[in-house]
Image: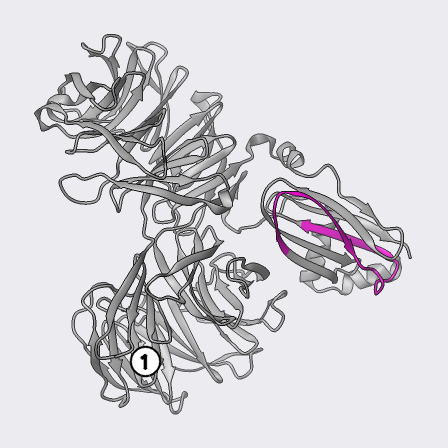
Amino acid sequence: MTKILKSLCSLNYRLLKKIVLIVIIALPLTVFAQDSLNVRFVGGYPFGNSFWMTGGTVNGHDYVFFNSGSSVIILNVDEPANPVKIGHIFSPIAMNPFLVDTLLYCAAYDRGLLIYNVSNPAQPILLGQCITPYPIWDIFVQDSLGFGIGVDSMPIFNVADPLNPTIISTWHQPDGGLRLIHVRGDYAYITAMRPFPYDGTLYIVDVSNPDSAVLASQLNYFFDPYDVTVSGNYMYINEPQLCVVDIADPVNPFVVGCFYFGPVYGYMGDMHIEDNYLYSGCSPFKIIDISNPQSPFVVGATFEGGVSFLAKIGDYVYGTFRGINVFDVSEPQLPFLVTEYHTYHYLTRVKVSGNLAIVSDYDQSGIKTINITDPQDCYELDYFKINRGSGAWTPEFEIQNNYVYVAALDSGLRILNISDPANIIEQGHCYAPDSAWIWDLFVRGDYAYIAGSKNYGFGIANVSNPSNPYFISGIPWQDTFQIHDVFVVGDYAYCGADDGLRIIDVSNQYNPYSIAKCSVAVYCDKIFVSGNYAYLGSPLRVIDVSDLYNPFLVAEHLNISVKGIHISGNYAYIAGDGVRVWDVSDPTNCQEVGYYTARFMAGYGVYFTNGYIYLAAGTKGLWILDFYGMDINEKLTRELPAKLTINTIGKNIKFSYELKRHSRVKICLIDVCGRITKKSITNESPGKYSKEIKGKDLCSGVYFLQIETSEYNMTEKIILLK
């Protein structure tokens, strides 16, 4: 026993931490490092705004990997004009991927560095992770070293063992503002935008000794430097112009010229150099001849399809820009756009019916149907664009039976038939009288209750025949108020208006009339009614409506942004800064009991059903989250298998377990000193499994068998007797 204790004490911190986690049997696995409480990320619809990317050839086929929404999307581009999605890697936050052979290195902000095996790109497998004490957003890998970039730090990773990446050392820059990195040989080239004195900076760091990187030189010359790349004795920096720096002596770099190549819409982005040509990420996309680095010139440009980050494979350049743009650059003087793979979405509202999520898209101004049968593999079924006067907008909608009722502003009330969710068709529509706009609506039975404008500040339409809806009554604006949202309970419509809450009697749909109001300081554009209380936003306010003729404010939470709200049971699910969960069992004293936020994450619409939170997260797509509630430990216990069945008598270890859903399964056998003696990672379908670990090379003693899946993380202590 003394020897075991001495061995434990001699372990490094990483192994000691693992032992501590092992001893505490069946603790829930913390998969992501986001700011969360009682809420975890499950899956979702991964398309959204695209940014970072990488690409190359894996096992004889061409692929691009790019950040999009809540995942990294993997496209097969063997046919550049027809990119095909074959897989994705879920990530609640943006990941910057970097491909080397069959390994994908990802800088994942506060999740640190993640390494995936993509030898089969359709089924990427997470091999290892190294949590950093600060967020990183860029990574460059050279040989067995990885170089990350955070706001003021460059961690250097040892990635020789992809299963166990570690930080060797960290170079710090107190001025901060670090952006992107390129490494060649013994030097790392880093762009930065310092907050003071507000000038662009290039740092050249000597990394010949990874244990102790040192600043070799810096240039405080640039206006707004972004990406950096190196070729020969020259370094190229993308900013509003192209800057060329002589780095024949990295300790004494000097600028040989800055070249303006015409207007750029947006910022300068990524770069790639090949065969004396520099491919520049910007809009419009440009190809620059750098055969004479001191006198570069544009040889080709496009007038359609921009580029933020790019990858070049053969004669094609793939660039992120609201998805992926594919350019044929076989003739650098005449590049042209081959195709677009659109991924940009701005999801703002969501409702769920069975295995179907219906969402509205601000960017495309329409309605989408998404199959959510498997949260880990959601996919779009159809999209229907709602035409209106001009500009992007957020379609507000309601679902009843197989119909989606859309408030389409100046395009009136639109009714879509989704009985076949893969083929949305318009069933009927009608315009509001006096050319009034329709902002929002609530549908119940044969009637749609509508928030509008002009002489129909509040209106009612008969929708008993979805093919022929028509307006039957309305109330004009009163006291200059405008209604933004409507919620109907019984014979009353509760309206979020410019001046707070309005209550309208709709017992006679042909003669609605206002009966009461409760004024607040800020207009209310979201409302949900539960029991005797109305919940309004934004910010969050609670109004007692037990006396319909005398509603009054009982609580307000001015620091809670409300862009969407849904109440189920004793909990209110609020979309705003991510998603927040409030216990409203006592509406006069609401308490926050859960939340989930991540970098660059926003929430615009929220829906709760069957234990899952569905969040329309803007450019991050549709998120599906699990709320444990106050019975978190009880729920976790229910999700775990009753017990791992283990047989350790004999030379081998036999065990069995069960999966309720498709999952990545990681199995480790760990000895008492924290060493992983056996390890396997597989992707498995739902079912019961019996497995065996060969023990011929194992000594008798104490081991820990650890199984990690998307459903649970269990560790069992076992004693091997041979």
Q: Secondary structure at mark 1?
A: strand
Q: Quadrant of the N terminus?
A: bottom right
Please tell me which residue is depicted at 63% across the width and 70% down the height of the picture.
161
Type of colouring: one colour
Q: Quadrant of the C terminus?
A: bottom right
Q: Hey, what amino acid is under mark 1? A: Tyr
Indicate whether residue 571 is drawn in magenta: no
- Prevalent SS, magenta region: strand
522 or 312, which is in the foreground? 312
Say above or below: 627 vs 166. above
What is the tally of numbered marks visible in this picture? 1
Magenta highlight range: 682-707
Location of residue 333 (image quadrant): bottom left
Please tell me which residue is depicted at 49% across the width and 23% down the height of the picture.
570
In the rendered image, residue 592, in percent from the top left (x then y), is placed at 48, 33
Indicate whether residue 695 is drawn in magenta: yes
623 or 496, which is in the foreground? 623
Read off the residue under disc 1: 236
507 or 659, which is in the foreground? 659
Is residue 148 visible in the rendered image? The answer is no
Is residue 32 visible in the rendered image? The answer is yes
In the rendered image, residue 688, in percent from the top left (x then y), is placed at 69, 43
In the rendered image, residue 177, in percent from the top left (x then y), is placed at 37, 66
Crowding near the residue tagged with mark 1, few <14, some 14–19, many ≥20 C-alpha atoms within 10 Å: many
In the rendered image, residue 174, in percent from the top left (x then y), is placed at 43, 69
Give the residue furthest to the right: 722
405 or 306, which is in the foreground? 405
Please tell me which residue is depicted at 28% across the width and 89% down the height of the picture.
291
